[in-house]
Image (cartoon, grey):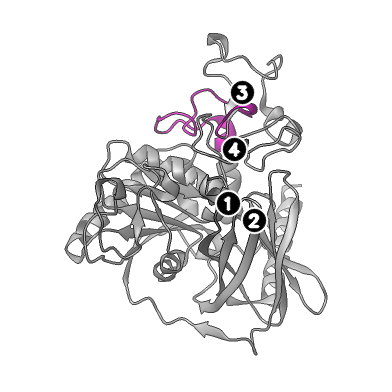
Amino acid sequence: MRLFISLLLVISALSAGAQFNRYFENATLRFDYFHSGSVEAEYVVPDEMIREGSWAGPRKNLIDPFDYGAFKIMVYDSITGKLIYTRGFSSLFIEYQATEQALTECGNFQESILMPFPKRTVKLEYYSRGKEMVWTRQFETFINPVKDEIRIKPGAGYVTEDILYSGKPKKKLDLVFLPEGYTAAEMDKFRTDCNRFTDFLFQTEPFGEYRKKINIRAVMAPSEESGTDIPTDSVFKNTLLGAGFNTLNTERYLMATDFKIVRDVASAVPYDQIVIMVNSPQYGGGGIYNFYAISTVDNIYSGFVFTHEFGHSFAGLGDEYSDSGSAAGILYLENAEPWEPNITTLADFESKWKDMLPEGTPVPTPATEEFKGKLGVFEGAGYQAKGAYKPYLDCSMNMIRFNNFCPVCQRAMRGMISFYGR
C-alpha cells in the first residue's frame, strides 16, 4: 500500500510539472495596475507588465485551494479555455474602503500581481468580493507574451544574502526581508536584525518544525536616511520604500504605499512572501494577505508585531479584536461567511473550525473562566463586537502575546506552509 501511495505522489508531481511546463516559462510576469474607487465604486486600470526572474512559486499548486482574500485573479489558456492559474490576495484598497474618507472621496493605490510567465496568449480575469462574499469580475484582458509590450526588468543591482537556505525555490516557502530606513552604514545592523527576526519566526509555533521547508533571503538595499516617517510627530525621512506611520489616518498603522518600489526591490531574489523591516523603535506595523508584512525592529514588542502581521500576510488570518477604526459600518454581514479562516459569522461554520471543537462546547461560547484557554466560538472579532466570532480568547491575533497562536490559526499556517513547501 505504501509503495502504491508513493507511486501516486510521484505521478501527481510529474503531472503537475508537465502542466506548468506546458503553459509557462520559468520566469515571472508582473502585472502592475492602479486600484481606485470609494465605498460604492471600484476601478482597475492597467499600468504596465514586467518580465522578472525565475518563478519562485509552487509549480504543483497552480490553482489556489484556499479562496482567501478580497480579490483574486484567474488565468485561462486562450486556446483551450482551461483554467491554468489562480491566486487570492488583498490590498490597501480594501482597507481604504472601510475608512471615513472613502465615503466621500475616491482613493487611488498602486498594486501588482505575479503569475508564471505564459508561453502563449492567456486571458486574465480580475475579481473582487464585497461584504456579501460574492465574487464580481472587475476587469479582464488578454496577454500575448510575444506581441504585448512587456518590459524586461534588469537586475535590481542590490547585494543579496541567504539568511536561511533549505532548497530550490519551487519546492520551498521563500521569504524576502527588505530593509526600510537603514543607511549604507547600517547594513550590518540590518543583517543582525534579519537573523533576529528569523529567530522570532522559528520561536513561533508552528514555524519551528518547518525550518527545512523555508528559505529566507535579504536584499541589502540602503536608504538615504535612517528611520521612517512619523507624521504625527512631524518626522519625515528620505527612505527607499517610503514607508510611514499614520497610514489611512491610523496612528500606529505603518505601511509602504509605493508598492511598485517594493516589488522592484523584492525582485532581486526569488520570493513568495515579502517582509519589510523598518529601522525604528516605534511600535507599529501592518500586514495584508499576499501583499506584505511590515514591522519596526527595535520595539520591545517587535517579535509579536512581526509574527502577528505575518499571520495576516501569509495565512490570511483576520484580527480577532472587536474595537474598530472603521467608519464604514459593519464589515461582516450575518448571512455571509468571512473568508478569513479564524473568523466566522456562523453563516457557514461547517467550513471553519467546527470539526476542531471539543464535544459539548456551546456555540456561541460564553467568555467565562470555564472556557479560557479552550477552543470555542467567542463573540467579538473582525473589528466588531457583535455578529462575528473568534476561536480563542487570548490568541496572538487578539492580544499582545508572542508565540500564542491558537490551534485554528496554527492549522491555517500549516496548510499554507504545505502549499508552498514540499
Is label 4 in a helix, a strand or a loop? helix
Q: Nearer the viewer, mark 2 or mark 1?
A: 1
Closer to the chain start, of discs 3 and 1, is 1
Q: Position of residue 9 (x, y in %)?
A: 70, 56
Q: Position of residue 22 (x, y in %)?
A: 71, 77
Q: Is 257 displayed left or right of 182 in the figure?
A: right
Q: CA distance from mark 4 to mark 3?
A: 21 Å
Q: Are marks 2 and 1 in contact (CB under 8 Å)?
A: yes
Residue 71 got which mark? 2
Q: Nearer the viewer, mark 4 or mark 3?
A: 3
Q: Residue under label 3, please give it.
A: 379
Q: Position of residue 376 (x, y in %)?
A: 62, 21
Closer to the chain start, of discs 1 and 4, is 1
Q: CA distance from mark 1 to mark 4?
A: 25 Å
Q: Spot the residue most to the right.
A: 80
Determine the residue positioned at 73% across, 44% down: 132
Amino acid type, callout 4: Arg
State the extent of the magenta-drawn residues as a range: 383-410
